[in-house]
Image: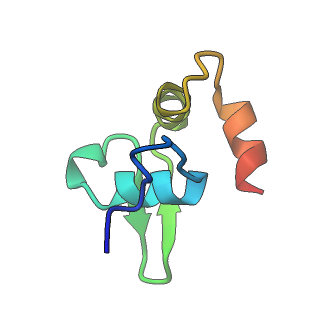
Amino acid sequence: MGSLTNESSGQIQLWQFLLELLSDSSNAACITWEGTNGEFKLTDPDEVARRWGERKSKPNMNYDKLSRALR
């Protein structure tokens, strides 16, 4: 199996992006696992939104927009 992202088309879904961040402990300053039930916490939601906007080439991404996509 390949990675979660489809590198050729640049397509990635938000849940895949969040899982990618969560799987790397160096991102703990902005997102961390919480408890044992698959819950996570955005410790720096603005940074997560900035990175998501960067990945999707949407420089105007902010937490308000990202949170709507999480619902």
Coloured how?
rainbow
Residue 21 screen position, x and y as percent: 37, 51
Tell me the residue at 22%/54% (across/down): 25
Relative horizontal placement of residue 17, taking residue 1 as reference (left or right): right
The residue located at (49%, 59%) in the rendering is: 16
Relative to 69, say whether 45 is above or below. Answer: above
Quadrant that contains the N terminus: bottom left
Tell me which corner region of the image, top left, top right, bottom left or bottom right, holds residue 30.
Answer: top left
Quarter of the picture holding the C terminus = bottom right
Q: Say if 62 sits above or below 12 in the image.
A: above
Q: Position of residue 50 (x, y in %)?
A: 51, 26
47 w.r.t. 69: above or below: above
Q: Residue at x 78, y 44 (%)?
A: 68
Q: Is residue 71 left or right of residue 39?
A: right
Q: Outermost residue toward the left?
A: 26
27 over 61 or under it: above or below: below
